[in-house]
Image (cartoon, rainbow, N blue to C red):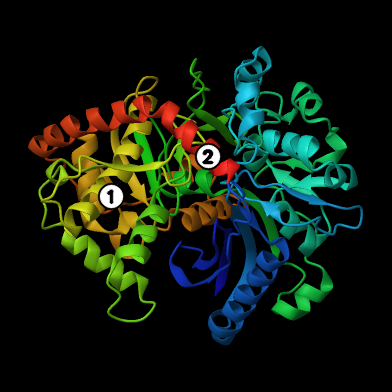
Amino acid sequence: MDCIITIEIGTGAIRVVAFDLNGIVLGSSKGSYPTFHAKPDFREQDPEQIFITMLYILKNFLNEKIHPKKHKVICLCFSSAMHSVLPIDKNGVPLGNAMAWSDNRAKKEAHDLKNSSLGKSLYNITGTPIHAMSPLNKIKWLKNNDKDRFSATHKFLAIKTYIIQQLTGEYIVDYSIASATGMLNIRTLKWEADALKYTGITKEKLADVVSVFYSPKKLKREYQASLGLHDKVKLIVGSSDGCMATLGAGVWGDGKATVTLEESGAVRVVGTEILQDEKQRIFNYLLTEGLYVSGGPTNNAGAVFEWYAKQFGDFKKAFDLEECINNLINDAGKVPAGSAGLIFLPYLQGERAPMWNADARGVYFGLNIKHEQQHFVRATIEGILYAIYSIGKTLEEHQTIKSLSANGTFASYPFWTQMMADIFNKPVHTKQASRSDSVAFGSFLLSATEIGLYKNLDEAAETVRLPDSFTPNKQLHNVYMKHYSIFERLGVKLFDEFEAIADLQQEN
């Protein structure tokens, strides 16, 4: 049986999924790797550890689930998280760790640029909000603060570019990842001269920009042998995880949006028009020529709830995080909507959309003597979904949203998905049984289109079926909106205090 394998290079894990040509999952595997926090605002990952993890997971998956069943791999398709920066030398060797998307060390550079005429111009040209996450500002930080590494750098790569280069020898970056750097003109599809001038580099310091359908050279012979793959296997560069999640959720056409709830989160829409936001709150990333995925990301989704579980959960079985999370969610269901006036600002890792404040911090507000653990659990979930709602509310200033599709690990919990429907006051559609892995399915649809199973991505997206629906409760929506209005005002009122506490942390 022919099969397509998708490889997602996520924030903290590699996910490998095999599909038959009808889109049925044949098997999957996952392997994790850490993020290092050497200093405040630093978020780094070891590129070689990521590459070795990818090889290990892929090889074991092939040997255990694909080769024994005589499945024939015809295609490998990649996706990855955005905004990473990895400096390499002229021999392709990493110059230290990669800066992950959540790395906030460039917040001064971002602040100065955002408040300039150049910043506004670059936002309009590139579609990327001016923030510390952006490779544009990360490279500028390296120029300002790590001059030796900056000078020694032959190229600045995204993690996915590094992995594909290791496998094939080519330095390439797809439209989607490139458009998230803050350095690509999303109309001309070329590196933007003003952005390059700002960072102090030339286009030769970056990878070549290619279509998401682009097929690199064949796997190097050593990897063909190691993985047991023949030289006819097609590699497809693929897209970003966000764009793939949107495609895999079938969010095509007016009135639809998708919500991703993984370690981080996002709300996205797809269209042929760039959504221009005067306050620079919305991103516009390319999926392919003339097709844009617009929306906003939050730093603080599932990672925040996992943090809560690890710090305060009751682990009845050692290291069983999933059971702990299930028990906490059951506890949250014992508390009425609104958590008895306890409100949580979930900004443990700063925040992106819609406030774009790298100094934002987490806050429990409204605490009184009657609050118990179950109130904290529910307030934590509500706060995460309020942050998601604030992004959707911003998007609706530009485009009507009538329904949502939900994907990601935390969208597989009915309690979360129902709460999302109630907060947004919109129906939510998902596929609960499959953990809603729309990133992998989006990569399958992209691959299937490239090899001719679908005429185009429009036809591919029409095949998506989300059988599970959640209908909003109007009464609960009204309760949530009263609490959300306080949540929204708190984020504004605490802006100066966020900055003050961040400055204290830097001093220490």
- The residue at 25%/50% (across/down) is 417
* 472, 463: nearer the viewer: 472
Query: Does dot 1 land on a helix, a strand or a loop?
Result: helix
114 lies above or below 75: above
> Alpha-carbon distance for marks 2 and 1?
26 Å
Q: Horizontally, is 337 left or right of 110 in the view?
A: left
Q: Which residue is mark 1?
A: 380
Measured as percent of width and height from the top left, residue 280 is found at: 51, 22
Query: How many marks do you count on the picture?
Result: 2
Q: Which mark is residue 412?
A: none
Three-letter amino acid code of the residue under disc 2? Leu
Left/right placement of residue 117 relative to residue 355 reads right
Identity, as a three-letter code, of the amino acid under mark 1 = Thr
Residue shown at 7% from the left, 36% from the top: 475
- Marks 2 and 1, the one that precedes in the sequence: 1
- Helix, strand or loop at label 2? It is helix
For label 2, count other residues whose C-alpha is less than 10 Å away and answer few (under 14), some (14-19) or many (20+).
few
Left or right position of 217 against 269: right
* Residue 14 seen: yes
Taking depth in this image into account, of 347 and 198 the one nearest to the observer is 347
Task: Look at the image and tell me whether residue 255 can be seen.
Answer: no
The answer to which of 301 and 31 lies nearer the viewer is 301
Q: Position of residue 423 (x, y in %)?
A: 22, 38
**Mark 1 closeness class: few <14, some 14–19, many ≥20 residues within 10 Å:** many
Pick the front one: 116 or 215: 116
Residue 445 location (% of width, % of height) = 51, 52
Q: In the rendered view, does 456 fall on the left or right side of 306?
A: right
Which numbered circle lies on residue 504? 2
Q: Position of residue 284 (x, y in %)?
A: 54, 29
Which of discs 2 and 1 lies nearer the camera? The answer is 2
Please state, as top left, top right, bottom left or bottom right, where the N terminus lies in the image: bottom right
